[in-house]
Amino acid sequence: MRKTLALLLSCLLLTACARQAVTPRSGHYHMSVPPETLIVPGLTLDTEAGTFLLSYDGFSSYLPVGTFEQEGTELRCRTDDGRYTYLFRVVDETTLAFIADGSADMTLIDDRSGAPVADGSLFLLAN
């Protein structure tokens, strides 16, 4: 009985101390890139409406726009046409990290035109 009670208390303590999912703020997030980068990838979130706009390639005629939902620390952005999904990990309320595995390809049309969005790329909320 004492072992069961001790185990139960340990589980409750660990659950209470577990990191809670943080909700990102609304606004424009820009990818952390060197200052000389011409085209900076960006993600705009409207948390009230649950919508997003993603820009990463100035030469692309496609503009990913759609809705997002959050499960734990994962932000899943799906385009309105259903063609593409982009995943981000919510680091804190002002920082997102791109998750390449499970996301649509974000290869640049011309490598010289901007910064490639790689796995783990950080997107920071603009002031």
Image (cartoon, rainbow, N blue to C red):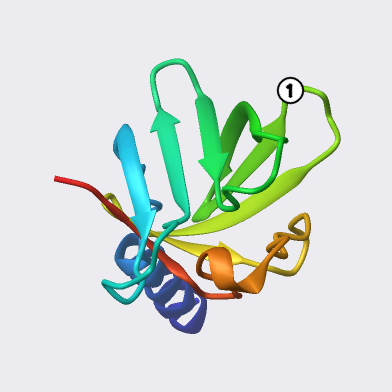
Residue at 62%, 66% (x, y): give it.
99
Residue 5's x, y, as percent?
43, 72
Q: Quadrant of residue 47?
A: top left
Furthest residue in direction right, as rendered:
83
Disc 1 crowd, CA 10 A, few/some/many (<14, 14-19, 20+) = some
Which of 25/15 is in front? 25
Give amino acid for label 1: Asp
Image: 96 above or below 64: below
Q: Quadrant of residue 60?
A: top right
Tell me: 60 left or right of 28: right
Residue at 22%, 47% (x, y): give it.
126
- Observer able to see residue 85: yes
Residue 67's x, y, as percent?
61, 26
Tell me: 100 left or right of 34: right
- Observer able to see residue 116: no
Which of 9/51 is in front? 51
Residue at 44%, 57% (x, y): give it.
39
Which of 13/113 is in front? 113
SS assignment at label 1: loop
Which of 113/52 is in front? 113
Residue at 31%, 73% (x, y): give it.
36
Q: Which residue is mark 1?
A: 80
Residue 23's x, y, as percent?
36, 42
Furthest residue in direction bottom, as rendered:
3
Residue 43's x, y, as percent?
46, 44
Q: Quadrant of the C terminus?
A: top left
Image: 70 above or below 68: below
Image: 111 above or below 56: below
